[in-house]
Image (cartoon, helix red, strand yellow):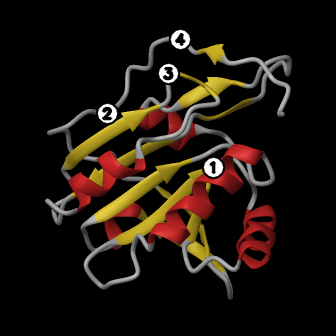
């Protein structure tokens, strides 16, 4: 049995359904290389997945679930992640997990701030990370679905997300 406390997080003032997804530019890391890219460079629809730093069990769990469910395996959806991990950490994470997804690197958590998906990392002064969150964006990058964790650890209802994926 895993021994950890569930922590209630402060209420998040996050981007909601009907909002235009805030655009940003950050290093986008794949299995071969990384480059600066803007969210607006990605043709919709998009599943934008915020997750904790690479190597933390919630990140591994979320990406295993997304991979096992086959999100983004067709041409109709692009799945990209965002975390505070550096491009070097993302590169290693992608390789170790055998992921076919690309990950934005947001060490300052500024993108997380734009989306209202940031939390202070307990016990580490000045360190913030992304809360687990999923934003589904339509072809015009309007938010069609938004979920942001309200406690740690917490994971999205993957079946609920998939029901919304079918509507994109």
The residue wearing badge 1 is 83
Task: Give the position of the N terminus as an image quadrant.
Answer: top right
* Residue 35 coordinates in the image, percent (x, y): 60, 76
Residue extending furthest toward the bottom = 32
The residue wearing badge 3 is 150
Q: CA distance from mark 4 to mark 3?
A: 7 Å
Residue 96's place in the image compared with 163, above or below, is: below
* Residue 22 coordinates in the image, percent (x, y): 33, 45
Can residue 104 be seen here? The reply is no
Q: Residue at x 30, y 57 (%)?
A: 162
Q: Secondary structure at mark 4?
A: loop
Q: Are the residues flagged by discs 2 and 1 in contact, CB closer than 8 Å?
A: no
Q: CA distance from mark 2 to mark 3?
A: 14 Å
Q: Residue at x 61, y 39 (%)?
A: 109
Q: Which of the marked residues, 1 or 4, is nearer the chain's N terminus?
A: 4
The residue wearing badge 2 is 15
Q: Secondary structure at mark 1?
A: strand
Q: Is residue 168 left or right of residue 69?
A: left
Q: CA distance from mark 1 to mark 4?
A: 19 Å
Q: Is residue 140 left or right of residue 111?
A: left
Q: Secondary structure at mark 3?
A: loop
* Residue 86 coordinates in the image, percent (x, y): 75, 57
Q: Which of the marked residues, 2 or 3, is nearer the chain's N terminus?
A: 2
Residue 8's tag is none
Q: Is residue 99 left or right of residue 66?
A: right
Residue 10's tag is 4
Q: CA distance from mark 1 to mark 3?
A: 17 Å
């Amino acid at each position: 049995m895993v021994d950890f406390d569930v922590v209630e997080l402060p209420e998040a003032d996050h981007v909601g359904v009907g909002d235009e997804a805030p655009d940003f530019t950050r290093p986008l890391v794949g299995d071969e290389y990384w480059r600066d890219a803007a969210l607006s460079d990605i043709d919709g629809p998009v599943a934008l997945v915020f997750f904790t730093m690479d190597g933390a069990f919630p990140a591994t769990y979320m990406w295993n679930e997304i991979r096992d469910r086959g999100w983004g395996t067709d041409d109709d959806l692009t799945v990209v992640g965002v975390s505070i991990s550096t491009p070097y950490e993302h590169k290693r994470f992608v390789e170790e997990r055998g992921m076919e997804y690309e990950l934005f690197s947001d060490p300052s958590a500024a993108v997380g701030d734009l989306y209202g998906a940031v939390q202070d990392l307990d016990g580490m002064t000045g360190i913030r990370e992304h809360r687990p969150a999923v934003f589904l964006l339509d072809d015009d990058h309007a938010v069609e679905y938004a979920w942001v964790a309200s406690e740690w650890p917490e994971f999205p209802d993957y079946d609920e997300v998939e029901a919304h994926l079918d509507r994109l």
